[in-house]
Image (cartoon, rainbow, N blue to C red):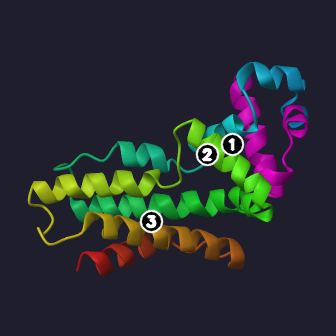
Amino acid sequence: MGTREKILAAAAGIMREQGYARATTKEIARAAGFSEAALYKHFADKTEIFLGVISSQLPALDTALGELTAGRHSVRGNLVRITATAIDFYTESFPIGASLFSSQDLLDAHRAAIRERGASPRGPVSRLAEYLRAERTLGRLPSTSDPDAIAALLLGAAFQQGFLRNWDADSGDPAGLARKLVKAVLP
């Protein structure tokens, strides 16, 4: 494991335990076994570390969305896989991101930094809706289906389950729940 990966692993652990707001670059560097200067050789700031943690240290929602190809595998199977992955992703990311809402100034600064990098928490819903539009064009979804609503419903439910799994510490079966959610939007 290289320096960058060690920093991201340390950051993920600290952010899971203390949240983004309380995780400092100094503490992350120390936990990774490096100086803070070494951390800044690999990352511009804490926001970049956060994005690295989200993309490489948590269940791979971004990767799963990138692998969706219209016309490949069943729509239902694809949606179950994405929804189960999203439940796991939101379960892991909720403790990290929840502390962002503890301060309006922190939230505003984080939003601005995320926007500067072209990232957005709306991205997964948009990408899933785009996939669903392509499936509708191929005739694999009814022409009356609403890709934006289906994507919002599935990923919104996954987000809620991530919250509930943290609240109750109930891991449950994401795949079983994902099948039920998909069945509700694709009877």
Give the residue at x 63% y 72%: 163
Q: Position of residue 31 (x, y in %)?
A: 87, 37
Q: Left or right of 40: which side holds 122?
A: left
Task: Classify 10 Å Cα crowding around label 1: few (below 14), some (14-19), many (20 and above).
Answer: many
In the depicted structure, whether residue 42 falls above or below residue 93:
above
Q: Left or right of 183: which side holds 32?
A: right
Q: Are marks 2 and 1 in contact (CB under 8 Å)?
A: yes
Q: Could you say which disc has been placed on residue 54 in the image?
A: 2
Magenta stretch contains residue 4: yes
Q: Position of residue 88 (x, y in %)?
A: 55, 61
Amino acid carrying mark 3 in the image: Leu
Q: Could you say which disc has been placed on residue 50 in the image?
A: 1
Task: Classify 10 Å Cα crowding around label 2: few (below 14), some (14-19), many (20 and above).
Answer: many
Magenta stretch contains residue 118: no
Q: Left or right of 165: which side holds 134?
A: left
Most prominent secondary structure in the magenta stretch? helix
Amino acid carrying mark 1 in the image: Phe
Element type where label 1 sits in the image: helix
Amino acid carrying mark 2 in the image: Ile
Q: Which residues are magenta?
A: 1-29
User: In the picture, residue 12 is in which quadrant?
Assistant: top right
Element type where label 3 sits in the image: helix
Q: Left or right of 58: which side holds 83?
A: left
Per the image, the residue denoted by label 3 is 155
Give the residue at x 83% y 20%: 38
Q: Position of residue 15 (x, y in %)?
A: 77, 50
User: In the picture, residue 94 is in which quadrant?
Assistant: bottom right
In which quadrant will I find the N terminus?
Answer: top right
In the image, 171 versus 21, the foreground residue is 21
Give me the C-alpha separation between circle 2 and circle 1.
Answer: 6 Å
